[in-house]
Image (spheres, rainbow, N blue to C red):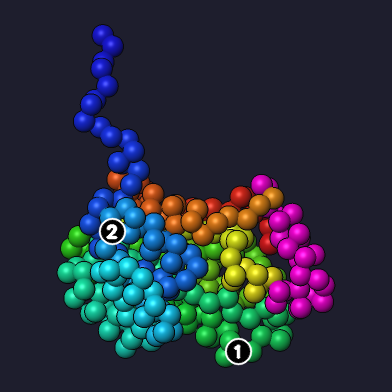
Amino acid sequence: MRQSPDSTFDPLAALRPAPGLRVLVTGGTSGIGLAIVRVLEAAGARVHVCGTDADRLAAHLGAVDGRTGTVCDVSSETEVRTLFAEAHEALGGLDVLVNNAGIAGPTAPVEKVDPAEWRRTLDIDLTGAFLCAREAAPLLRDTSGAIVNISSVAGRLGYALRSPYNAAKFGMRGLTESLARELGPDGVRVNEVLPGFVDSDRLNRTTQARAEAMEVPFEEVEQILLSKTSLRTKVSEEEVALLVAYLLSPAARGISGQSLSICGNVEYL
């Protein structure tokens, strides 16, 4: 006999994060981080953010009633501990950590990369994610929560002239898979999102730096980048944020330890 549809099941609701999620987004005052904050807040989440610029953070917090935040450099153990103490106080617990804070690092041949810039890039882009995950783990075990690490297609493809950033993003994949195995028995899901060429001020800056390193016009480098993408297009910050929201929805409850690219299929870098 043909069964009637289950009237209690709402497929659209299953694709949205549950209202009331308590979320910490690092690097949440601009770019992809800000897009993630806005999408999750629209879904009913309570969001605590961090950033390194006190003035920008103050303007960010003043834009929405109830939004909270902390000035924090995620490469500092002391500042990360303060961040989590303030986030816990503001939210009353934690359901989600979005590790988004990061820098582009230098664009240069490896022999011209300053070792201090190498260390700074890894300290923020990789060690920062580790320090935040370290503080978040006991809180997320209590709530069977989730971690989403924002990485890059540079975490699955080699990237000439960007060795510090490339190494940090490959490291993020290992961190993601390790945490997924370690925290999974407690119901904590860990995934990473790999954006491609995101239409943003940051991409314009790195493209300009690459053009200068290659001694060619900006427009030529931009066309080279797009030619490496099957869809010949950039992605938007909002598209990245929507993928994060999906990973926090009931529909994604079986997804963990995965690296999901949102890039128009970048074929090579």
Question: Where, quadrant-wise, is the N terminus in this rendering?
Answer: top left
Judge by depth and name the residue closer to the eye, 41 or 144. 41
Q: Amino acid at mark 1?
A: Pro
Query: Which region of the structure is painted magenta?
Result: 208-231
Q: Is residue 176 above or below residue 81?
A: above
* Disc 1 target residue: 115
Q: Count the marks.
A: 2
Task: Determine whether, in the image, residue 156 is placed left or right of residue 36.
Answer: right
Question: Is 50 located above or below residue 37 in the figure?
Answer: below
Please report the residue visible at 76 percent of the width from the left and 73 percent of the height from the top.
Answer: 211
**Location of the C terminus (image quadrant):** bottom right
Q: Which residue is mark 2?
A: 45
Circle 2 SS class: loop
Q: First in sequence, mark 1 or 2: give its number.
A: 2
- Does the image show residue 181? no
SS assignment for the magenta stretch, majority:
helix
Q: Nearer the viewer, residue 33 or 187?
A: 33
Q: Quadrant of residue 244?
A: bottom left
